[in-house]
Image (cartoon, rainbow, N blue to C red):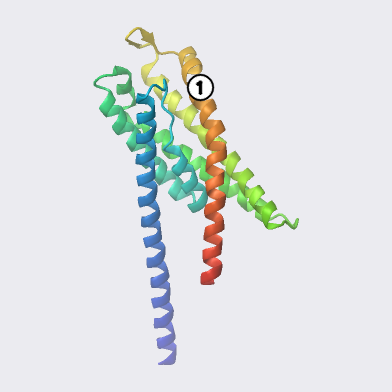
Amino acid sequence: MLFIFENICIITFMNNVENHKKNKEIATLGITLALVVVLQALAEIIQKFGLPISFALGLIPVFVCGQVYGVKFGAISGGVFGLVSLFIALIYSGSIPMYAVAINPLVSVLPRILCGTVCALVYKGLSKAAAKSTKPRTEKQKRAVNFAIGCFSTICGVITNTILFLSMFLAFAHGKNYDGLVINFKWLLSSVVAINTVVELCLFAVIVPSITVVLNIIENKRQDENGEI
């Protein structure tokens, strides 16, 4: 009887842990979805006030989510951002024909899933490598290493998004004329890569790892308080 009771207690405990984990995942994805929508809407509003380009601000929560919560979350949140991008393209395509190219999951969704995945994978791999180091580090040094890893993985994510999105865009729009503008590789380099990508690299490489470091500190403190491993 005692053996059966112990097994029941263990199963109940494991179920509670699993339910807590699932609830946490749902809450995390919900918050990420909201942030992606709000930040990308903000990017579009800023553009309407005279900025000649639109930055992919929705990638910020995608990269943070992937770094803090893992590859699965990076891919899912990237897919959410891709769907938001597709919806925006659908809205604008009536007045700006060039947006019609992005009403294609291969152009707007797939690159975002993969960039979130790449960012999370790079962060996970480098974090494991850093954890294996036998060199003693202070808390400040650990945070600096965490920031550097977050910075590099963010750069990898931005570059992945740029290469895949522009490659897909060019594949479906190369040579087409939109109100006198001919889409070609030279145009992409001069108008998109030279401005959007450079600015996103500089901004995101600072913003994303800063948020990641803070969230990791909070998560570690929470685990210590709850006695989690």
Q: Which residue is disc 1 drawn over? A: 195
Name the residue at 39% across, 47% down.
32
Q: Is residue 122 above or below residue 195?
A: below
Residue 100 screen position, x and y as percent: 29, 22
Q: Is residue 145 above or below residue 155?
A: below
Horizontally, is 175 left or right of 127 in the view?
left
Name the residue at 52% across, 42% down.
208
Q: Residue furthest top?
A: 180
Q: Secondary structure at mark 1?
A: helix
Q: Residue furthest right?
A: 135
Asked whether the viewer can see residue 182, the reply is: yes
> Which quadrant would residue 59 be assigned to in this image?
top left
Horizontally, is 142 left or right of 214 in the view?
right
Residue 36 screen position, x and y as percent: 38, 41
Amino acid carrying mark 1 in the image: Ile
129 or 85: nearer the eye? Answer: 85
Residue 170 screen position, x and y as percent: 42, 19
Horizontally, is 72 left or right of 156 in the view?
left
> Which quadrant would residue 99 be assigned to in this image?
top left
Asked whether the viewer can see residue 159, the reply is: no
Name the residue at 42% across, 69% down.
17
Q: Residues within 10 Å of mark 1 (few under 14, many from 20)?
A: few
